[in-house]
Image (spheres, rainbow, N blue to C red):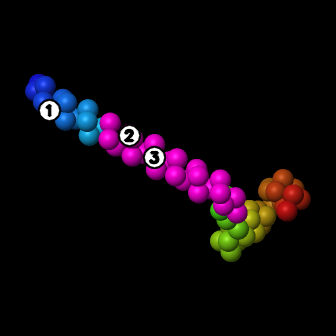
């Protein structure tokens, strides 16, 4: 069994980590809200993946018609 002081320490550490996590997620939301162009990243890699999807015959009708 863990002593009472050990339990208090574990609760304190986990609480601090939870608070840091919430603050970090909130900061990410603020940054993305202020910079909407950061939501969608259109890189060469994503274009290459789109081309790869369109190369398979089964997906040509589904995906390539919307490009």
Task: Name the residue at 50% across, 48% down.
Answer: 25
| Residue segment shown in magenta | 15-37
Q: Secondary structure at mark 1?
A: helix
Q: Can you tell which mark lies on residue 23?
A: 3
Dividing the picture into quadrants, the one containing residue 37 is bottom right
- Asked whether residue 17 is drawn in magenta, I would say yes
**In the rendered image, which residue does mark 1 sit on?**
6
Local crowd at mark 2 within 10 Å, few (<14), some, or many (≥20)? few
Local crowd at mark 3 within 10 Å, few (<14), some, or many (≥20)? few
Instruction: Mark 2 or mark 1: name the one nearer the start of the chain.
Output: 1
Residue nearer the viewer, 40 or 53: 40
Percent of width and height locating residue 7: 18, 29
64 displayed left or right of 2:
right
Instruction: Identify the residue at the far bottom of this view.
Output: 44
Question: Disc 2 to disc 3, how far (Cα)?
Answer: 9 Å
- Asked whether residue 5 is drawn in magenta, I would say no
Residue 52 visible in the snapshot: no
Quick check: 35 above or below 30? below
Percent of width and height locating residue 14: 30, 38
Task: Name the residue at 39% across, 41% down.
Answer: 19
**In the rendered image, which residue does mark 2 sit on?**
18
Instruction: Mark 1 or mark 3: name the one nearer the start of the chain.
Output: 1
Q: Nearer the viewer, mark 2 or mark 3?
A: 3
Task: Name the residue at 32% across, 36% down.
Answer: 15
């Amino acid at each position: 069994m863990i002593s009472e002081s050990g339990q208090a320490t574990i609760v304190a550490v986990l609480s601090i980590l939870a608070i840091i996590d919430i603050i970090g997620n909130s900061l990410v939301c603020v940054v993305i809200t202020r910079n909407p162009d950061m939501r969608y990243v259109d890189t060469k890699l994503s274009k290459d993946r789109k081309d790869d999807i369109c190369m398979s015959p089964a997906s040509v009708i589904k995906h390539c018609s919307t490009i």
